[in-house]
Each structure stands twice: as structure tokens, then as C-alpha cells.
Image (cartoon, helix red, strand yellow):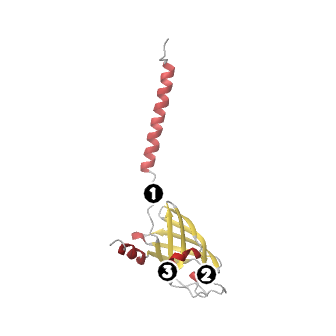
Amino acid sequence: MNHFNFKSLSFYGVAICSVLILFKIVTNYGENKLKAPLPLKQSYRLIFGEKLPDCNQPDIAILNINQSGVYLNGSLLPTNINAQQTSTTEQYPTFSGRYKNKNISLSGQVLNSVICNNTNSENGKDYKTVNIQMYIEKQDNLIGKMTVDGMNKAIKFSAIPNQKQETSVNSNKH
């Protein structure tokens, strides 16, 4: 009785070679084509390039970003928030977005008082829908524009990593 049938051996040989070739292709693609996105800083100072019409707009705001791969969450905070209030940033609405090829897009709700200092709401909880489009410039700086519901014009801004955060982290290492 012949247990080594040529058809069976060739079938198993082709099956094993096919799996090895497929493994080689997938491994090569993963090593050469798939790259993790660069990490973003956690906090940026937004410097607006122009004033909004009918708005007592602040010159600077803080954009906090949390990154998980290409997915982003964040919030836009006023600059007058102090260290005790940073733990209560849950009161500020959040953005969600994506990070792809050095381009960042975020959208969500923002308190009107963060964008305009002259909010007309009694309780200060007047929200605006905001869309942010940014790209990474050299040295972790961001350049972008923000569109706000109810305003015809996009606001141009630049964002630099927040220095207060980095110095407080570095001072804790000593």
C-alpha cells in the first residue's frame, strides 16, 4: 500500500508554499507600507490670525488633544483656566476627529465663551459647532482654519505646543 500518493504530496506542497508566500507578502507590506502616525503633543496654544465680526474674541485659546493612533479627541479651553480647573475640564465639550498624513480634522461643540468673550447666554452654556482643519508644520507647529456655525468666514490660526505643560512634566522628573 502506497501512502505517498503524488497528487496528495503535490497538493500539500502547493498549499504550504501558498501560505508561506502569502505570509511573506503580508509581512513585507506591514513593514514597509504601514507606519504609525507621529505622536501629537497633548496641549497646543491656538493663536488666531484675525478677529471675528461682532465678537470680543480672545487672542489665544488652548486645544487639548488625546490621540489613539489615527483617532483624536480633544477640547478647546480658554487660556484663563488655572491649574485647579484643569481637573474639571469635563465640563467643556469635546471634539472627535482623525489624523492622516500630517492632516488633522476635528469637529464638535465649543462653548461660545471660549470663542467669543461676549456671550449673550444667561448661564454661559451657549454652544457652537466647530470644525477644525490643520496640518503639521515643522517642529510640531500646526497651521489651520476653524469654521464656526453661524459665521460665514473661517478663522485662520497657528498652534504651538503649550510650554507650561512641558515644563511642569519636566520639573516633576527631578
Query: Quick one: label 3, few (<14), some, or many (20+) residues within 10 Å?
Result: few
Outermost residue, top direction? 1
Q: Could you tell me if the residues under marks 1 and 2 are in contact, i.e. CB atoms within 8 Å?
A: no
Outermost residue, right direction? 122
Secondary structure of the residue carrying tag 2 is helix
Q: Residue at x 65, y 81 (%)?
A: 126
Secondary structure of the residue carrying tag 3 is loop
Q: What residue is disc 1 on?
A: 36
Q: Nearer the viewer, residue 171 or 70?
A: 171
Q: Earlier in the sequence, mark 1 or mark 2?
A: 1
Q: Residue at x 50, y 72 (%)?
A: 64
Residue 28 in the image, given as x and y percentages of width and height: 43, 45
Q: Residue at x 49, y 80 (%)?
A: 84
Amino acid type assigned to the residue bearing label 1 in the image: Ala
Q: What residue is disc 2 on?
A: 112
Q: What residue is disc 3 on?
A: 84
Position of 119 relative to 146 (above/below): below
Q: How many marks?
A: 3
Q: Earlier in the sequence, mark 2 or mark 3?
A: 3
Amino acid type assigned to the residue bearing label 3 in the image: Gln
Q: Nearer the viewer, mark 2 or mark 3?
A: 3
Amino acid type assigned to the residue bearing label 2 in the image: Asn
In the image: residue 127, left or right of residue 142: right
Q: CA distance from mark 2 to mark 3?
A: 22 Å
Query: Quick one: label 2, few (<14), some, or many (20+) residues within 10 Å?
Result: many
Q: CA distance from mark 1 to mark 2?
A: 35 Å
